[in-house]
Amino acid sequence: MAENKTAAKTAKATKPAAKKPVADKPAAKAEKPASKKAAVKAQPRLKALYNTELKAKLKKELGLKNINQVPELKKVIVSSGVGKKREDKKFTETVELTLAKITGQAPTSRLAKKSIATFKIRKGMGAPVGYLVTLRNDKMYEFVDRLLNIALPHVRDFHGVSREAFDKQGNYNLGLKEQTVFPEITFEDAAALHGLEVTFIIKNGSKEGSTKLLELFGMPFAREDK
């Protein structure tokens, strides 16, 4: 009888351990990193191309010893002046809308840096004399890709862009006569035509290095006269 009671007590003591459910939570947690990886945004085409191929190619072609000396596009400034039409609200709204549509970023207004009596302009006062957008990182590469492969090919009688528009630091300036070359601009947006200026700010730039960088991106430079 004593043995039977002991066996019964042992059975009762082991019951709680048998009721414990098998924990599946660690397996569920292990699946989370996979979902995070799937949510990672893909790099813009030109950015990925620069990091995987162009950077090493530029180092070799320019004869540089250090990879940190390679020219790199740091920012792009898209701007437009309003000139004598600065008091024309419809025109200035068109300029603002154009910059916002083609860059995907809200433009900032610029006041005059100096007074010009002839045009009744006072330094830092009155209506804006222009608008600009500064693009960096992914937005910058996406804009440059659209500019080089979609907008410039739509320019009338296009024979390439100038090779002489570099400054001493290797930054490049490109002017466009009309905003209609961008596919984002509709017929209604083109009621008031205006020009644009695009400035490429290049780190470690020089005329030779910056030219090579932009050529590899696809900049359609005009042929050199021989």
Image (tube, rainbow, N blue to C red):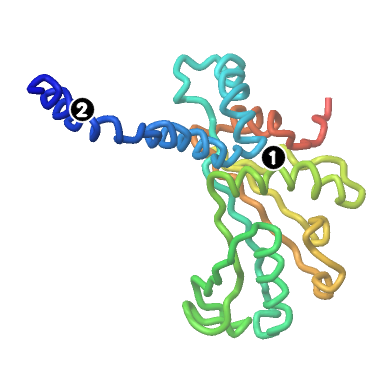
Q: Nearer the viewer, residue 167 or 1?
A: 1
Q: Is residue 218 left or right of residue 19?
A: right
Q: Position of residue 54 (x, y in %)?
A: 62, 24
| Residue at the extreme front of the image, as rendered | 1
| 166 versus 127 height, above or below | above
Provide the secondary structure element on which disc 2 rests.
Answer: helix
For image coordinates 76% across by 67% down, the residue present is 194
Provide the secondary structure element on which disc 1 rests.
Answer: loop
Label count reads 2
| 194 versus 12 height, above or below | below
Q: Residues within 10 Å of mark 1 (few under 14, many from 20)?
A: few
Using the rendered view, name the quadrant where residue 15 is placed.
Answer: top left
| Residue at the extreme right of the image, as rendered | 157
For image coordinates 79% across by 63% down, the residue present is 185
Using the rendered view, name the quadrant where residue 80 is placed.
Answer: bottom right
Q: Position of residue 173 (x, y in %)?
A: 65, 48
Q: Pointer 1: what residue?
A: 164
Q: Position of residue 156 (x, y in %)?
A: 90, 52
Q: Is residue 226 left or right of residue 201?
A: right
Q: CA distance from mark 2 to mark 1?
A: 93 Å
| Residue at the extreme left of the image, as rendered | 2
Q: Pointer 2: what residue?
A: 11
Amino acid type shown at disc 2: Ala
Q: Nearer the viewer, residue 96 or 82?
A: 96
Q: Residues within 10 Å of mark 2 (few under 14, many from 20)?
A: few
Q: Position of residue 211 (x, y in %)?
A: 65, 32
For image coordinates 73% across by 82% down, the residue present is 90
| 13 versus 44 height, above or below | above
State the quadrant of the N terminus: top left
For image coordinates 19% across by 32% down, the residue present is 12
Amino acid type shown at disc 1: Glu
| 169 versus 128 height, above or below | above
